[in-house]
Amino acid sequence: MAQYQRYARHLPVVAALVGLQLLAPWLWTGYYLAVERPRLLRQGATQCASQPSRSPDRAPNDCDLALTMASGARRQDIYYSRSGRDVTTVTWQGTTWYSTETNYRHTSWSLVLPGAAMLAMFMANVRKMFRTGAVFSWQLAKHPADEVEQLIYLYALPVFGAGMLSPLLWQMAAG
């Protein structure tokens, strides 16, 4: 029991990282509503419901704001979803459709912490390889992890697990 008590002071940090990972989509939506949406409105974005879309078949169903940017003959219609998680950019060259791109920003941000956790676990394994001289899994299994490696796993495994679990929770919350 004394072995695990030395790690007790790290548990609040681990819990905060896991909580941050699980709350990431709602934090992103809060950021969009509080910071980014007002900035877009100041830049001239209009609400999708108040104006007909120039490209209705290419705009997202839950469109919140639309912003048009032009450079010469090229025009971009940028559509933001209600939660700010998805941004769809429709590019026109004159009156000809050129491309449609959708950026799923919440997906990108939700992978930052699990990616860092996976990198930390990889570094712990490489450290163990250098420390023990083992290369293969069956060789590594013969050697217990030292205190530093245990601490890395204490942080990395729950955050990585939350990163794998959070998309399922987001889908359940979305509908």
Image (spheres, helix red, strand yellow):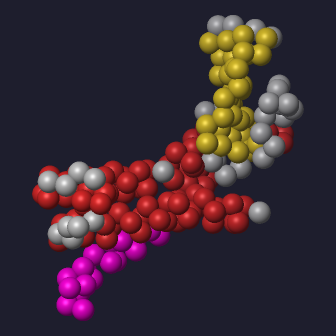
Based on the displayed image, in which of its 4 quarters is residue 71 positioned? top right
Q: Tell me, yes or no, whether the highlighted magenta stretch contains residue 74.
A: no
Given residues 13 and 167, the one toward you in this image is 167
Based on the displayed image, in which of its 4 quarters is residue 102 positioned? top right
Q: Is residue 11 above or below residue 81?
A: below
- Asked whether residue 145 is in view, the answer is no
Indicate left or right for 36 with 83 as reference: left
* Quadrant of the frame with the N terminus: bottom left
Given residues 111 and 133, the one toward you in this image is 133
Indicate left or right for 120 with 163 as reference: left
Q: Is residue 56 above or below residue 69?
A: below
Residue visible at 47% across and 70% down in the picture? 19
Residue visible at 63% across and 66% down in the picture? 169
Based on the displayed image, in which of its 4 quarters is residue 57 positioned? top right
Q: Which residues are magenta?
A: 1-20
The percent coordinates of residue 27 (x first, y second) are 54, 59
Given residues 129 and 84, the one toward you in this image is 129
The percent coordinates of residue 161 (x first, y second) are 47, 65
* Quadrant of the frame with the C terminus: bottom right
The percent coordinates of residue 122 (x first, y second) are 30, 52
- Asked whether residue 102 is in view, the answer is yes
The percent coordinates of residue 156 (x first, y second) are 35, 63
Most extreme residue toward the bottom is 1
Indicate left or right for 104 with 149 as reference: right
Q: Tell me, yes or no, whether the highlighted magenta stretch contains residue 2.
A: yes
Residue visible at 34% across and 77% down in the picture? 12
Magenta segment's dominant SS is helix
Residue visible at 83% across and 25% down in the picture? 54
